[in-house]
Image: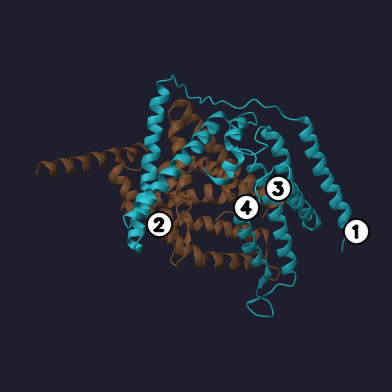
Amino acid sequence: MLPIDAAAHSSCWRRRHPLDKAVLGLGLTVLAVSLPPWPGAALVLVAALVLLLGPARVPARKLWRAYRIPLGFCVTGALSLLVQVGGPEGLLSLADDGPVRAGELLLRTSAASLGVLLLAFTTPMSDLLPRLVRAGVPAPVVDVALVTYRMSFLLLDSMSRVRQAQAARLGHSTRAATWRSLAGLGATAFVRAFDRASRLQAGLAGRGYDGTLHVLVPDVRVSRRFVAASLALLLGLTALTLVLERLLP
Amino acid sequence: MHIAEGFLPPAHAIAWSVASAPFVVQGVRSLTREVREHPESTLLLGASGAFTFVLSALKIPSVTGSCSHPTGTGLGAILFRPPIMAVLGTITLLFQALLLAHGGLTTLGANVFSLAVVGPWAGYGTYRLLKRYEVPLMVAVFCGAFVADLSTYCVTSVQLALAFPDPGTGFLGALAKFGSIFAVTQIPLAVSEGLLTVLVMRLLKQSSKGELVRLGVLSKRKQQQSATEVGTGAGA
């Protein structure tokens, strides 16, 4: 199981309805993207971090491990804004407003990423996917996504074991051997995926499969109090941004 | 490479989502039709989605000595066709955003457009064009995967250049800036992905010929021919 999904399954907000957490997490992401980066995205970043480490009780180490991936991309992307092409100072020169633009971008992406991580760290995909039908996603697409989700872990597990076996047979000792091993890995993934699908098909056919996958979804209700509190927080952050924007330099 | 969460301004994020929507809707329609006609396809399509997800997690050595992962769009488009890849690619990108913090939900439209629409269509178009001129299968597969990978990164460069124009030279300057950064890293990676795809396809031809015929990558006539050759060889 992947670390974020494993953390979501053991989250203290696991029993909350996905809509509760989507309103809060995605609401923070939308605010981070649409409010002015300073002070809007900075406020969203602090709020998301407090929620993640406080009420949602996401372990700080796990959060950092997941957060450093988008953060790395954000830093690399922001660096490109520091320079400009052409101009009187040569082919490449430092952009006048580069540091400001890079800083704003960094704030926006960091805050938006934390909003999505709040949803991801508290909501397993197995809770989220079946409910997408109610949101208007066609049932066959949701079924395919459910099979993809469940089969991905099995395949990743298989791939990990095949990679270990290849390494034990010196499959990564030379560049040529590495390429051969990688090709074998890719082909094995294909063969195993289709083999599992046909075995699953045979098993389901024996149980009267009619093309619809019935999965048990935990019966939880949307908490009006939680949604109202989330909306109040989002409104509060927006109002505070508008006020601080006038007061701060 | 995926554009990270919140990287694009809201107007750009919405515009790229609108641009991707017709392709994804077309893919959803063909997928729904396929599943209604053949209910067992749900499992095969799910397996295909899982294969695409796992393929994008493979680490390939790059010429510069570092490692990166293949986009998988070329192989996916050749095996499953671009309309289906638009849906499978969207599902994969959603999983990557939520399970790996790779990409994002606000940038999903932009990432779908580059990785699940342009990449598969460009790669598949190249592959079909070369097949029409009876170029050997593996050459067509290499070119398809190479073009799919490279076109994905070209579109990403355009998306970033549109969002962050250069202060001095505007869109073209930014395109040169992002394009040159990607060219250094991505051309070797596109070659690597092309080679990897050829190696995978060679192994699949040996181990999963039946599946390749069912997916329309190999024709039945060619499979029968090769079966006869094997039979004759065995008899001799």
Q: Are marks 3 and 2 on the same chain?
A: no
Q: Are marks 2 and 1 on the same chain?
A: no
| Relative vertical location of residue B180 with respect to residue B222 in this rendering, above or below | below
Q: Position of residue B104 (x, y in %)?
A: 62, 49
Which disc, if any, is residue A130? none
Between the residue at mark 1 and the residue at mark 3, the CA separation in whole angstroms equals 29 Å
**In the image as oriented, which residue stretches furthest toward the top?**
A208
Q: Earlier in the sequence, mark 1 or mark 3?
A: 3
Q: Amino acid at mark 3?
A: Leu
Residues at marks 1 and 4 touching, judged by CB atoms closer than 8 Å? no
Taking the spot 38% from the left edge, 51% from the top edge, the residue there is: A164
Please name the amino acid that badge 4 sits on. Answer: Arg
Between circles 3 and 2, the one closer to the viewer is 3
Residue behind mark 3: A53
**Chain for numbered disc 2:** B
Which mark's residue is nearer the viewer, 2 or 1? 1
